[in-house]
Image: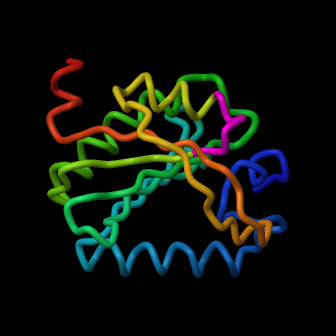
């Protein structure tokens, strides 16, 4: 995790230590086993190198989920997230039985909004969220897609 990537992420501080990574992976494993989340380690097909991470987690409303993701700097702009996002969203709808999935990003994060729009997500509003990585509130814009929205785009 680099500062250039972390600046866009609410819960991925820098430095991000191996112990922090192990803890995060274990938490996501537990949530996945409980049927409340999906986590995706994004790897290069050529080198098997870790290039990013994506998750879908059930919200307090059990029919709704949140999608989050990041890519390492050197892999941004190569289509990895545009390839993964529709697959992750489809898995969230099917495996977590969600009716809608939303994603949010800081209002200046145009790359994230391009990914959201590319897989059919539509803007639904903005809100201040607490970003523990920086210990402050930040304005974010949110997008969402409803079950069936991916099939409509196919």
- Give the residue at x 49% y 34%: 45
- Give the residue at x 52% y 73%: 25
Quarter of the image where one finds residue 31: bottom left
Q: Which residues are magenta?
A: 105-110
Is residue 150 located in the magenta-colored stretch of the structure? no
Q: Is residue 96 left or right of residue 47?
A: left
Q: x%, y% of residue 136?
A: 77, 67
Q: Is residue 108 left or right of residue 87?
A: right
- Give the residue at x 41% y 36%: 84
Determine whether 100 is above or below 143 in the image: below
Q: How is the image coloured?
A: rainbow
Q: Nearer the viewer, residue 132 or 41?
A: 132
- Give the residue at x 65% y 67%: 130
Q: Is residue 107 left or right of residue 54?
A: right
Is residue 106 located in the magenta-colored stretch of the structure? yes
Q: x%, y% of residue 35?
A: 23, 72
Quarter of the image where one finds residue 33: bottom left
Q: x%, y% of residue 125?
A: 48, 42
Q: Nearer the viewer, residue 106 or 127?
A: 127
Image quadrant for the N terminus?
bottom right
Determine whether 131 is above or below 8 in the image: below
Image quadrant for the C terminus?
top left
Quarter of the image where one finds residue 22: bottom right
Give the number of callouts: 0
Residue projecting furthest to the top: 154
Determine whether 133 is above or below 6 in the image: below
């Amino acid at each position: 995790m680099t500062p250039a990537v972390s600046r866009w992420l609410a819960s991925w501080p820098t430095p991000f230590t191996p112990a922090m990574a192990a803890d995060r992976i274990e938490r996501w494993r537990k949530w996945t086993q409980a049927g409340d989340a999906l986590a995706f380690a994004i790897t290069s097909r050529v080198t098997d190198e870790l290039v990013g991470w994506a998750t879908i987690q059930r919200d307090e409303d059990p029919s709704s989920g949140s999608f989050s993701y990041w890519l390492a700097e050197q892999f941004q702009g190569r289509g990895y997230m545009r390839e993964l996002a529709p697959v992750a969203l489809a898995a969230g709808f099917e495996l977590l039985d969600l009716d809608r999935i939303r994603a949010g990003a800081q209002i200046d994060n145009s790359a994230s909004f391009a990914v959201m729009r590319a897989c059919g997500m539509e803007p639904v509003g903005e809100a201040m969220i607490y970003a523990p990585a920086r210990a402050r509130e930040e304005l974010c814009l949110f997008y969402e897609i409803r079950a069936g929205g991916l099939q409509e785009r196919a």
